[in-house]
Amino acid sequence: MKKRWGLWMLAISLVLLSLSACTNEQAGQGTTREKESTNKEEPKATPPPQPVTLTITNHKSVGFTEKDFQTYFVEPVKKKYPHITLEYIKPEKGSELEDLIAAGKTPDLVFASNGYFALLKSLDLMQDLNEYVKKYKVDLSIYDQSIMDKIRSVGEKGELYSIPFSLNYGMLLYNKDIFDKFGIPYPKDLMSFEEILPLARKINRTEEGIQYIGFEPNYSDTIVGQLGVLAIGSNDTPNFESPEYKRVFSFLKQVYDIPGQIGPDGKFNWGRNGLIKDRNVAMFMEWTNDAAAPLEEAAKAGFTNWDIAGLPNFQDHLGQGRTVDSHMTFISKTSKHKEEAFQVLLESVSKETQMLVSANARISSIPDKAIQANYAKNMPSYNGKKVQNIFLTKMTPSPKSSTFGSKASSIVRDEQKNMALGNKDVNTALKDAQERAIKNVEEEKMK
C-alpha cells in the first residue's frame, strides 16, 4: 500500500514539473516576442507628394476658354490631386505655342485639335503615353474608336500621343420662324443634299426688303471631308481635281444659281450671323462646338425659335458626318513632371468630367448613351431642341493630314468664291486651286 502511494506521488510530481516547464517556456517566449516587437521598426509613413505647378496652353483657334480651363481641368484635378497647381497661358501675340518654345518656356500641356497633328509632330513636341496608360491601367476601349484610330495612325512605332477630350460633329441648324412665315414644312431629322436643294429654292426670295436664303452650305473643303477626302493629303499633294471635289463644287454651283442666293454686293457666304443675328438664313451647316456659345448669346437677344437636324450629305453617303475632328491634350516631351501631367490629362477624360463636358454642349469622347443623353443639359438655349439629331451621323474617317492643309483650304475657299460669283466655271476654279496649292507647297518647302 505504501509502495503504491509512493508511485502516485511520484507521478503527480512529474506532472507538476512538466507544467511548470511549459509555463516558464511560454513566459520566456512572450518576453522574447515583446523584445522583438519593441526592437522592430515601425513602417515609415508615405510622405505627401511635393507641390507641382504645371502650365497649359491651347493652340491656334481651338475653342478653349479660361472657364473651360477651370471647369474641366482645375476643378477635377484639385479634388484628386490637391498638390497639383495648373497655370493657363493664354495664346496671344508673343505667347503663341511657337513663341513659348522659342523662348524655352514650352508648356507642360498643350490643348489642340487633331488637325494640328502634323505640326506638333514636326515640332517634336508630343510625348508617347503608352507607358502611362499601362501603369494606370487605362481602358482605352471606352473612347470613340474612330478618333482613337486617328491618334494611333500618327505614331510610326505604335506611339500613343493623347486620349481624346471631346469630339466635334456637324449639324444642320434651321430657323423655324422663316419656315413658318412661308408655310413650308420644317426639314426632316436627316436630309440629303438632293432633298435640300428644292427646299432651298422654295425659300429664296426678297420680301419687305429682306433677302431670304434657304440654305447656306458654308465651305467646300468641309463638305468634301464628309466624303473622306482632305484638301491636301499627307503626301502634300492637293486633291482639288478629285471626283469628290468636282461633285461638291457642282452641287455648290446649283446652290449659288438659285435666284437671290448671291447678295447685290457679291455676298455669297452668309455665315452663322445670317441664321442667328440677321435671321434671313433658313438652314445653316455648323460645327457643334462652334455653335453653342453663339446660340446662348442669340437666345439673350430673343432668337429662340430654331432647331437641329442631322448633318446632310449626298444620298449615297447619308449618315456620314464631318471628318474626324477631336480636341485633346498633349504632354510635352520637355515637361519635368510628365507623371503629374498625365494625371491631369486622365482626370479631364474621366467619365465624371465627360458627363459635364456633354452637359455643356461638347460631344464627349466616350460614346456612352447616358453621357449622350446629357448633351446640352446646362445650356438653356437648347431646352426643347432636337439635340439627339446630332448623333444621327457618325464622323467620317480621313487619311493623314499635311502641314500645308490650312493654306490649301484657304486657296480652295477663294476659288469657291470665284465660282460662286460666276468669275470661273467649276473645272477652271478647281484647276486653278490645284495649281495655286502646288505652288504654295513648293514655296513653303524652300523656306
Image: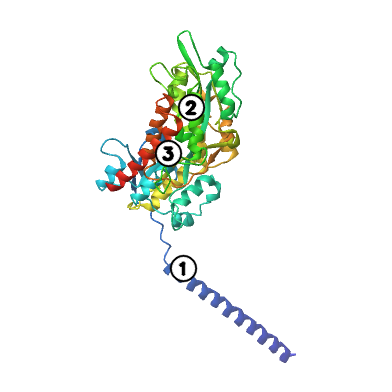
Residue contact between numbered discs 1 and 3, judged by CB atoms under 8 Å? no
Quarter of the image where the N terminus is located: bottom right
Residue found 38% across the figure and 33% down from its top = 65
The reply, left or right, for residue 42 in relation to residue 102 is right
**Secondary structure beneath disc 1?**
helix
**Secondary structure beneath disc 3?**
helix
The residue carrying mark 1 is: 37
Is residue 199 in view from this perspective? yes
**Looking at this rendering, what residue extends furthest in the top direction?**
208
Residue found 51% across the figure and 72% down from its top = 30
**Secondary structure beneath disc 2?**
helix
The residue carrying mark 3 is: 75
Q: Residues within 10 Å of mark 1 (few under 14, many from 20)?
A: few
Q: CA distance from mark 1 to mark 3?
A: 45 Å
* Mark drawn on residue 253: 2
Q: Residues within 10 Å of mark 3 (few under 14, many from 20)?
A: some
Q: Amino acid at mark 2?
A: Lys
Q: Total marks drawn?
A: 3
Q: CA distance from mark 2 to mark 3?
A: 49 Å
Is residue 69 in view from this perspective? no
Q: Mark 1 or mark 2, which has the lower sequence index?
A: 1
**Looking at this rendering, what residue extends furthest in the bottom direction?**
3
